[in-house]
Amino acid sequence: MTIPSRDGRTPADPPHQPTSEHASPVEATDQAAESAVATPPSGAAAAGVALRTPQETPPPPDDNGGGDGPGDVVLRLTDVVKTFPGVRALDGVQLEVRAGEVHCLLGQNGAGKSTLIKVLAGVHHADSGEVNFLGESFAPATPQAAMRAGIATIYQELDLVDDLSVAENAFLGHEDSRFGFSRRRAAAQKTRGILARLGHGEIPPRTMVRDLPAAGKQIVSMARALSHEARLIVMDEPSAVLAHDEVENLFRIIRELTAQGIAVIYISHRMEEIREIGDRVTVLKDGRTTAANLPARSTPTRELVSKMTGRSIEYVFPPRRPPLQLDPLLVVDGLSRAGEFADASLTVAPGEIVGIAGLVGSGRSELLETIFGARRADAGTVTLDGQRITSVGKAVSKGMGMAPEERKSQALLLDEPVYKNMTLASFSGFAKAGFTDTAGERRAAEKTADALELRPRDVNRPIRTLSGGNQQKVVVGRWLLENTKLLLLDEPTRGVDVGARAELYQVIHDLAERGVGVLLVSSEVPEVLGLADRVLVMREGRIIREAPASELDEDTVLDLVMAGSLTTESILEGEPA
């Protein structure tokens, strides 16, 4: 589906050459910035990367450097190219990052952001072009070499080991040891200090990572980055799993880091975050830099979106017709799970979109998984079209589908091709007499890929090679092939760019128009209000408010979800505490 600009035209792609403007001053002092750039991190020599001595000075920024801030140039990419079979992922990328600044990187899914991150992290190696870090040519042979040289990366899909403790994950790869033995007590003590610095001293260092919620795992990933003496930290959608108050804490940490002269590359699709925390912005599209060093606080959103997509759209919600007054398709009655949520009751009618708003940890995701049969309820019932749902198999057979929050670990077979993942829920329809109709699978997947504007369209590609937004399209598209009556969506646009987000909104809208009931969870209140017909507000495992979306606004919902602890009296009265 092609989404035109507001005047109805589809603009041409932006020119190959990036635009360049002067940036707003960064917050770091000259002294802190010089200290951060001039002093190599410990162990950098072992990384095989040449760093200048404190007496040397970095080359002066060129005329296109943009930026009036006091920080020296920490990182400069010039005409960087990276090609994979059939795909030119990076096509002459330009990027300049200064000490003590937050440099925001924008681009649609598939624009090349992930590939660029992996080049900096030593996962991939550039085919041509120049990468200059701390005044010297930079080409780390391994991720460990990049880390030792002073570049730490926090990936959107967290690379933690579930069966190790928080402390073991924080120091993974550079364990504190003596005579060949790990010093677990010392590692735990250091981890405790890092967690306190991050504002999460309540997380026990010896807790297994698998026992932490998604937000807790994000904090552990940040702790790992801070356990190294980094001069540049790359953060890929760091706020995606954080609640509102945790985002403020994240920004506090980032400001502390930049005040020490540490540079931060911040990747986010949330414009309000870029305005608040960013200094300069570089935009990628189709592997090219379409805009460089734009001031983050003053560049109009319309201009940024246009550079990203080639069209002037923002967060556009499709117009909705009032849903028909039909009998409920899904009925949840008194559903409870100890320690997660209690006495949850709700309904969803055919063609109705019901949204659940609440903070991370409020029980939203756990409720969805229990409705789907992935968790066993302690009390209450779930019925779909009059049929009791008690397991995932029963849910799918009766027409219920789910796109979970953690798509890579819970929804995708990463080493399988796109078409295999697309037909996973409807596989029995492509099997006959013990044989699989592979050609039929491909045809069905190609049709769905075209409808969802999957990029690239090749359904034979391993799905791990797709960007996060396109992987999410595959997860949603899986249920378009099945006779789905009800679709559960947990954070459907997490980490998805502006253009793909609008396309997913249209997909959800089209499903409802076809009579599919939709129950969705999102951390973004405007998304819930813009998509849903009715909204349920959850806090501390309780549904505390239900109302038509037209009767709520963002401020009201935020007041409800961020209020103090619930009291017994307020729960009984159905009012917020």
Image (cartoon, grey):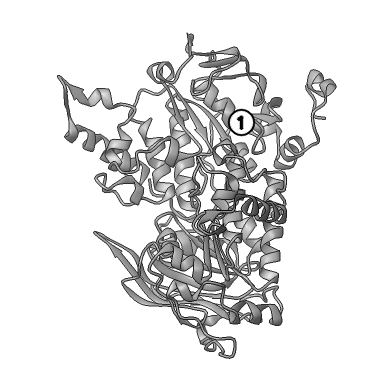
Residue located at (56% from left, 59% from top): 178
Residue 488 at x, y percent in the picture: 50, 28
Image height of 251 relative to 535, above or below: below
Q: In this view, does 472 lie above or below 288?
A: above
Q: Which residue occupies 67% across, 33% down? A: 362
Kindly identify which residue carries mark 1.
364
Q: Where is residue 275 in the image (x, y as percent from the top left)?
A: 65, 62
Q: Is 49 in front, or is 347?
A: 49
- Quadrant containing the N terminus is top left
Report the side of 226 relative to 562 (left or right).
Answer: left
Residue at left offset 74%, top offset 42%: 555
For the question of whether residue 30 can be seen, the reply is yes
Q: Is residue 76 left or right of residue 220?
A: left
**Residue 250 found in image quarter:** bottom right
Q: Outermost residue, right direction?
A: 569
Quarter of the figure with residue 17: bottom left
Report whether 566 appears left or right of 506: right
Q: Nearer the viewer, residue 458 or 212?
A: 212
Q: Position of residue 452 (x, y in %)?
A: 37, 42
Mark 1 surroundings within 10 Å by alpha-carbon count, few (fewer than 14), some (14 through 19), many (20 or more): many
Count of marks placed on residues: 1
Q: Note whether residue 270 is visible.
A: no
Q: Position of residue 464 (x, y in %)?
A: 35, 48
Give the camera-side residue of 185 and 135.
185
Report whether 172 appears left or right of 227: left
Quarter holding the C terminus is top right
Q: Residue furthest front?
A: 179
The residue at 31%/71% (across/down) is 127
Residue type at the position of mark 1: Arg
- Classify mark 1: helix, strand or loop: helix
